[in-house]
Amino acid sequence: MNNIVHVVLLGILQGLTEFLPISSSGHLVILQHFLGFKDPQVFFDVSLHLGTLGAVIVVYRQTLRKLVKSGSSVLIKPDFYCRPIRTVSDTPDLKLIWFVLVGSIPTGLIGFLFQDQLELMFNRLELVALMLIVTGLVLQLPRLRKQDNDQVLKAWHAPLIGLVQGMAIIPGISRSGSTISLALLLGTSPETAAKYSFLLSIPAILGAVVMKLKDLTVILISPTNLAAGVLTSFIVGWLALRFLLSILNRGKLAVFSYYCFFIGLLTFVWLRI
């Protein structure tokens, strides 16, 4: 991984597709097939993920600071240990932390139990194309429900959204697109849907990093190229996340579905030529 152009391109790809609802894994598989890109080294791949994780932390830094402050302060209060369920239920910040933890459980189980089977899917380009079309359909689902109801994330929403996030390990299924679409379909506001989706992505990204680090053998990338890739994924990821939030606030999430339909169908046609 000593070609600076490939390093920057992979950083751009990671930054854009990690947050825009168009599937980062699906695009990587397609690019590998048609453009001859190779899988990035484990260490470099992990670094790119940490770059986009940094973008999430920066965008939601105020929320994260508030959650950490609320979580740490309640741990020193006796009431929490006497009545933990009631304390969590009565404290919005603790409730959100709990929802993130609950939502992370099905994601982690799917990733751990089906990792080998899911990795085989990365060699099936037709499946990736089909999953991109599925992602396009998923992005249309919020249109089935108007956003004029409770607008609140409920306890039973968390495991469902976490389950969908786990299914997004399949290449071609967008993690952000599927989790945000389901949250909107369940009646939450766009702001709440995005916040929960990207807070839920933090343990998911960290889990993926840990899983990949166990395959690390030797580091064959220069510090300069590594820094270029991480910085690129961070900057592009930050811009992509801000762009997605603006699209969500305007209720235009479905526009990404047409891109997914186009890329999925184009890949099918190309494979038949």
Image (cartoon, rainbow, N blue to C red):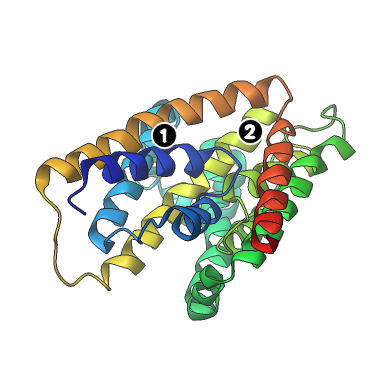
- Residue found at x 54% / y 79%: 117
- Crowd rating for badge 2 (residues with CA inside 10 Å; few <14, some 14–19, many 20+): some
- Looking at the rendered structure, the secondary structure element under dot 1 is helix
Residue 186: % across, % down: 79, 44
Number of disc labels: 2
* Image quarter (top left, top right, bottom left or bottom right) of the N terminus: bottom left
Residue 236 falls in image quadrant: top left
Alpha carbon separation for disc pair 1 and 2: 20 Å
| Residue 90 point in image, percent of width and height | 60, 40
**Observer-nearest of 132 and 54:** 132
Q: Nearer the viewer, residue 147 or 172?
A: 172
| Foreground tag (1 vs 2) | 1
Residue 79 position, x and y percent, is: 47, 48
Dot 2 corresponds to which residue? Answer: 192
| Quarter location, residue 74 | top left
Residue at x-position 40% and y-position 61%: 208
Of residues 191 and 48, the one nearer the viewer is 48
Report the amino acid beneath label 1. Gly
Identity, as a three-letter code, of the amino acid under mark 2: Thr
The residue lying at 57 percent from left, 43 percent from top is 197
| Pick the front one: 198 or 263 | 263
Q: Which mark is residue 237?
A: 1
Q: Is residue 27 above or below residue 191?
A: below
